[in-house]
Amino acid sequence: MRYLFLTLWLLMPCSCFGSSFSSLLTIGNADPVPTAKESIAVSAGTLVVDFHKYAVPLLKGTLNKQSYHYSDYFFQISHAESGLTVERFDFSRGTYEPTNVCDFPIQLIGGKVKFSKDRSILVALQDYENGCYKWHFPASTDDSLFVANLEYERLIEKLRQKLRDENRHYADRALSFTDIKIDEDGHIKELWFGFPENDLLKGHVIEEGANISINWENTFLHEDKFHPSLQLFSVDVEGDSVPYYYVPPAGDSNGKTVVMVEGGPAVQYEGKYSTYIKAFTEAGWSVIIPQESLRRGYGWKYFSKGFGELGRKNLYQLLHVFHDAIDKNFINPEQTHLYGRSYGGLVATSFALRWNELHAEAGLEIRFNFQSIIADAALVDIGSEMRLKSDMIILGDMPREDFRKTFMPLHKIGSTLSAPLTLVHGRTDRKCPASYIAEFSRKLQSKSLSHKLFWHKGGHGSGYGIEHLLYPDFLLALAQGDSTDELATSIGFIRGV
């Protein structure tokens, strides 16, 4: 039996709103798919859906539905509080017909789905839980799906046992399965895996008879890069459970905490900051990673709660997380720092500029101030030249110009900063344009608001700066108030201010 491997992204999981994608459906690096009934030879098997073109033009209220093509097949995927539903279009009848997936309970929005040759049967659905990707095998009349589920679990146990037999200290650490391969007979023989607590260590396991082999993406030089285990907590905010991760210090605590807000916001934490977390926790810090609305790993209701709330209620949710972390003694109000990247940089600069205002809007008392704020590759404005993935999701009903003036940091500079601010940015960043950061810095200077600015040669997230092995040490030095001159020079940073 031949299987097609498809990926559906409701929102492309990149770290900024302004990224540019093809305006048509694309399969791997192939040409855009023409129409539903035109046949196309496809060697790759990844279907990428442009959310902006195919979802947003639908009527408001239908953002939970995605229609897409694969060769001469046409599918519709719907998310609701009750779960995921997949329907296939029957051209002979001109109607959508059900598959074996109807109101399937799932947390991950826009995860990978895998179809069988029989287009009415989905073989596997990707999901997310506690920082890890996992797979579900929906019920059907096809017994092979039951077998696939058993093989999936068996292959995972074989992987763990092999790691134990090799005395790998991480054999029983949290595992994330980013992809699976199902052969033509419907059997699972391959898994792609990683560790959310050490994002540098990844591999591909292949079953060969009674044995397995592991092809490591990175060498065992990274085996010691694990940080303490992620611990998931939540706080109730207006009837919604807002999750956040807590990572304790690796040894004795120094009483300091860093809050890390990653990009997106339509991504869920999957380990991308593991090297930063390791650097901080080894130095005695604890770490908080909030997961506010629009993060994709917590179900449709929670995801959609964030529509049109950037700069507003999503920031209020973060304030509630901070209060809850204080109540649980995860945060020392006298020693808490903030790091945010991309969209997280929007959060960081917003807190630097609007700390008092946001507390007042959220109806919360100010229980602490950050000791330092680091905004990396920050999105500080959305000019007319920047294409948003979905105006409805980002802006809500507010016109873009009104949104910019009301919420974007470039237009919210007042007379004070709530904490010492450091900006880090790439000269060739197009997703969160470097020109906006330069203008932001000039405006801060015009208001006599002291800050630091470090430039690197790269773009939004590759080539320079954040990929340097010393970058976690640089962030730690910034937060601790240590000298960064040697580190900045080694990494290739140039001081702007």
Image (spheres, rainbow, N blue to C red):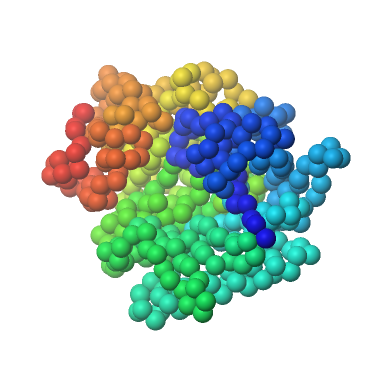
Residue 17, position as x, y percentages in the image: 49, 33
Residue 99, position as x, y percentages in the image: 77, 52
Residue farthest to the right, as pictured: 93
Q: Relative to the observer, which residue lies in front, 152 or 131?
A: 152
Residue at 72 percent across and 35 percent down: it is 37
- State the quadrant of the C terminus: top left
Q: Relative to the observer, which residue lies in front, 134 or 320?
A: 134
Going by the image, does 215 lie left or right of 5? left
Q: Tell me if I can see residue 491 in this picture.
A: yes
Residue at 56 percent across and 75 percent down: it is 154
Going by the image, does 265 lie left or right of 286? right
Going by the image, does 490 lie left or right of 413? left
Q: Within the image, what quadrant is residue 204 found in? A: bottom left
Residue 459, position as x, y percentages in the image: 33, 34
As drawn, 423 above or below 145: above
As drawn, 211 above or below 327: below
Residue 50, position as x, y percentages in the image: 58, 34
Residue at 30 percent across and 66 percent down: it is 220
